[in-house]
Amino acid sequence: MKHHRKLDEDKVPVLSGKEALVLELLLSNHAAEMYGLELVRDSGNRLKRGTIYVTLSRMNDKGYVESRQEEPQPDVSGIARRLYHATGYGQKVYEAWQLAREARRMRTVEVGGVS
Amino acid sequence: MPFSELRERMKKIRLANPVEERAALEQYLELTPRTRLMAGVILGMVISAAVVFIVLKFVSEAAVSMMLMGFLAGSLSLVMRFTIRKNVSSVSRPPGSFLLSVSGFFCSRKTQEEVATQVIADMRIEYSQALFERRKMKARWIRIRYFWIFVCAVGLHRVLNVIADIILKRSSH
């Protein structure tokens, strides 16, 4: 079940540092789908266990990521975990965020060089 | 059986089997379920009374209510430890079951599905990994750590803060 909010087309999408990191990890992963705990481990403790699912839930609402329940296996019992993957929209927002960050870095270098 | 003989016997079986060790001690002390219950209750009461006395004497009143609850829970667990026989088989729930039921009461269905359940699933994975590696202390630490992670992730710390504020305000009046 998806919980996407209605996207406001006039609003420019914004990425927080954590959201950008999550997208970076999801996009750099060849398997494309990752568990929350995998993201925490791969981030080298930059993402926390207490906040990762809240962040992912918010990103799901914004449409940056999508999730699905893992398929139940006959031998394994327990809670079904969720697998997350970046959407095309999330990938574009991440690329735009990278470009904006790069532009700001260049601007900082220019301003630093003048002064 | 003289005490020295018991001590030697305990030394031999201590590392071998804790259930046998307990049975030998109970046999020596001739403990019945009723005496175990009485001993547990008395011990719990004595510990609680001592702790309350120390806290009331040396610590400010604001902290009393919080500490009292913790120590009462501790003494209750001591009573349980003395009264419940370890070798009786029991059905235990997997870790995190209580937290899941709590979150089911406090949280929305979406938070339950996307946050609470996932945090508990992670805890069970890390917990079972630690048990598989035979690291019991690490497994216990994971349960404690994930309790706080769960509270923060689900937002229950706000509820706890409100309760703490009420207790502190009441104790300050």
Image (tube, coloured by chain):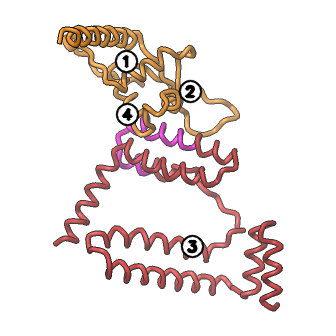
Residue B80, which numbered label?
A: 3
State the residue position of label 4.
A54
Q: Mark 4 or 2, which is nearer the eye? A: 4
Q: Chain of mark 1?
A: A
Q: CA distance from mark 1 to mark 2?
A: 19 Å
- Residue A112 image position (x, y, % from top left): 22, 13
Which callout, 4 or 2, points at the residue further toward the start of the chain? 4
Q: CA distance from mark 1 to mark 3?
A: 50 Å
Residue at figure coordinates x 53%, y 83% from the top left? B43
What type of secondary structure mainly makes up the magenta span?
helix
Residue at figure coordinates x 60%, y 50% from the top left? B139
Residue type for callout 3: Met
State the residue position of label 2.
A70
Does the residue at mark 3 contact the one at mark 4 (Cβ under 8 Å)?
A: no
Element assignment for label 2: loop
Does the residue at mark 4 contact the one at mark 2 (Cβ under 8 Å)?
A: no
Chain B tint in image: red
- Residue B11 image position (x, y, % from top left): 79, 75
Residue type for callout 1: Tyr
Q: CA distance from mark 4 to mark 2?
A: 19 Å
Asked whether B102 falls inside the magenta stretch, the response is yes
Chain A tint in image: orange
Q: Chain of mark 2?
A: A
Quadrant of the image containing the C terminus of chain A: top left
Element assignment for label 1: loop
Pointer 1 local density, CA inside 10 Å: few below 14, some 14–19, many at least 20? many
Which callout, 1 or 2, points at the residue further toward the start of the chain? 1
Pointer 2 local density, CA inside 10 Å: few below 14, some 14–19, many at least 20? few
Report the span colored magenta: B101-124
Q: CA distance from mark 2 to mark 3?
A: 40 Å
